[in-house]
Amino acid sequence: MLQPQQFYRNLSRTAFFLLFLIAPVTNLFRYDLTEGHFILFGQSLGLGIDQAIAGVAGTDAAFQILIRVLLPIVILVAAGIWIAAKYGRLYCGWLCPHFSVVELINGQMQKLIGRPTIWEKGSKPHSSAAWLMLIGSSTLMALVWSVGLLGYLVPPLELYQDLLHWQLGGGRALFVSVATLVFLSDFLFARHLFCKFGCALGVMQSLLWMANPKALMVSFDSKRADLCKDCNSACDAACPMRLPARGIKRRKFTCTQCSECIHACNEVQKDNPGGGLLHWTPGDQYRDPDKDRMIPAINIQSRKKEDDDERR
């Protein structure tokens, strides 16, 4: 059963993914290559530059550039910096269309081949049919992404009509073909690596988050770590980015604040009056005051081995 935060996150991700697809169709936002200017909320964003060049109302053109372009950019960047410094990769975990695909394919791989990535060991027998289903669904999603992106550059309705009638021009067909192959490779092999190291927006959010010692993060209650002995690292398995949920902050540099690890731990500890061992806190609340360092997550496998040795 979905917990409230999971429900709202799924809702926000789905809504933003749909917005990503319909924004160019509705002229909400796109860049028209044929006209050479942006379209925002159905209006051409010409900024009055042509009039300024013609010597008509040059001051008004400069004012329009300031109000329409520079001021919104400054506000957007400032808001993004504040959110990232306080909450980390909030955009990635709650809105990003690419990360939505990451989680979708993670789930498909887990069901079809028993592991969320091809780089991990599997725990489920699978056949060639499972791989065909996985490649087919990933190809479809890659095609959706490539066509969706092209719709931001050319008239989208014209593009979709040509696509339906198999009449794409040479340049458009080449773009869709190459982009589909690139996205398919990303989705199957490198989606986590791209999120961790290839996405400039994601890396910038992580750097701002790491620079703030009081930023919101998932903290592990190491004092109750004995409760983890009977758990098969459900929190680590639930993480879409394959991070150590019980690790210190620097080991969770690319955390997307999706809270899946918290929900997994709560589910395991649902019969425990004290609840789960992972919590949202402003900074790590489990520091060693004497040495002023983060307390690392306890090696659960080592603890299990020690307990087994004591029993013997």
Image (cartoon, rainbow, N blue to C red):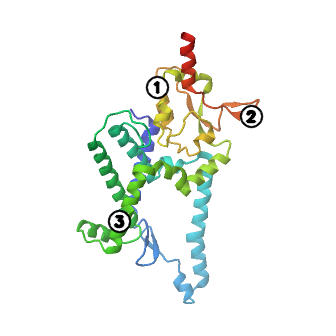
Query: Residue 285 appears in which quarter of the rendering?
Result: top right
The secondary element bearing badge 1 is classed as: helix
Q: CA distance from mark 3 to mark 1?
A: 44 Å
Q: CA distance from mark 2 to mark 3?
A: 53 Å
Instruction: Name which residue type carries label 3.
Output: Val
Q: How many marks?
A: 3
> Which residue in the protein does label 2 denote?
292
Q: Nearer the viewer, residue 259 or 299?
A: 299
| 244 w.r.t. 81: above or below | above
Instruction: Name which residue type carries label 2.
Output: Asp
> Which residue in the protein does label 1 denote?
268
The secondary element bearing badge 3 is classed as: helix
Q: Nearer the viewer, residue 229 or 96?
A: 229
Apparent side of residue 63 relative to residue 108 in the rendered image (left or right): right
Q: Position of residue 289 (x, y in %)?
A: 74, 30
Pick whichever of labels 2 and 3 is earlier in the sequence. Answer: 3
> Which residue in the protein does label 3 denote?
176
Q: CA distance from mark 2 to mark 1?
A: 31 Å
Image point (32%, 46%), residue name: 134
Instruction: Name which residue type carries label 1.
Output: Val
